[in-house]
Image (cartoon, grey):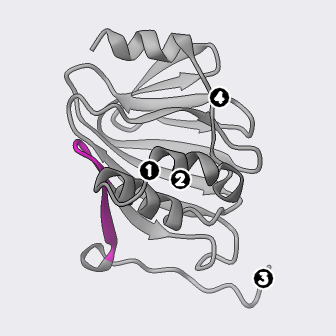
Amino acid sequence: MNASARPVLVRAGSAETLQDGATSLITLLADSDRTQGALTANRAGLRKGSPGAPAHFHTKATEMFFVLGGSLRVLLGDRIITLETGDFVTVPPRLPHAFAPARGEEADVLVAFTPGMDRFDYYRLLERVHLGEATVEDIKASSEQYDNHYYASSLWEAELAGD
């Protein structure tokens, strides 16, 4: 047991919320530096029609999704599943994945990474791109820093084209 580890409490009213796209919000809960590297957690609010996150993978962490409300489509390698309220899935390192709300639905999702990864500045970069203060090239240049590696998935592109 780590005697120096401390609980991390984040009150809803004090959590930083970012708009990373016209139809999505990210609420920052706990980054790696606050959890002594144990995990990183955020809450993703995806409105109807949100493109969600494009296909990507991580090399160092497992990503977890717990659907708090609504319905979420998730690409897991070469298949797409739909998660409903209360459903949970883990995505191991190196598995290409993507997510977006199910057609005609919204999704409220708790997202966590373990071990923790410094991700909050990545989410802030996404908001700056949305606001026109940074570019997609800046995101591409940050892939090693944030362990976020984009991946071309014709399956996911076809899935979103049906929206």
What secondary structure is marked by label 2?
Answer: helix
- Vertically, is 83 above or below 30? above
Circle 3 is placed at which residue position? 2
* Residue 52 shown left or right of residue 80 in the figure: left
Circle 4 is placed at which residue position? 96
Q: Is mark 2 in CB contact (under 8 Å) with mark 3? A: no
Q: Residue at x 51, y 67 (%)?
A: 121
Mark 4 closeness class: few <14, some 14–19, many ≥20 residues within 10 Å: many
What secondary structure is marked by label 3?
Answer: loop
Judge by depth and name the residue closer to the eye, 25 or 72. Answer: 25
Q: Position of residue 143 (x, y in %)?
A: 65, 49
Looking at the picture, which amino acid does disc 3 mark? Answer: Asn
Mark 3 closeness class: few <14, some 14–19, many ≥20 residues within 10 Å: few
Q: Which mark is residue 138?
A: 2
Looking at the picture, which amino acid does disc 4 mark? Answer: Pro
Q: Position of residue 104 (x, y in %)?
A: 19, 22
Looking at the picture, which amino acid does disc 1 mark? Answer: Thr
Looking at the picture, which amino acid does disc 2 mark? Answer: Asp
The stretch in magenta equals: 15-25
Callout count: 4
Circle 1 is placed at which residue position? 135
* Residue 129 shown left or right of residue 45 in the figure: right
Mark 1 closeness class: few <14, some 14–19, many ≥20 residues within 10 Å: some
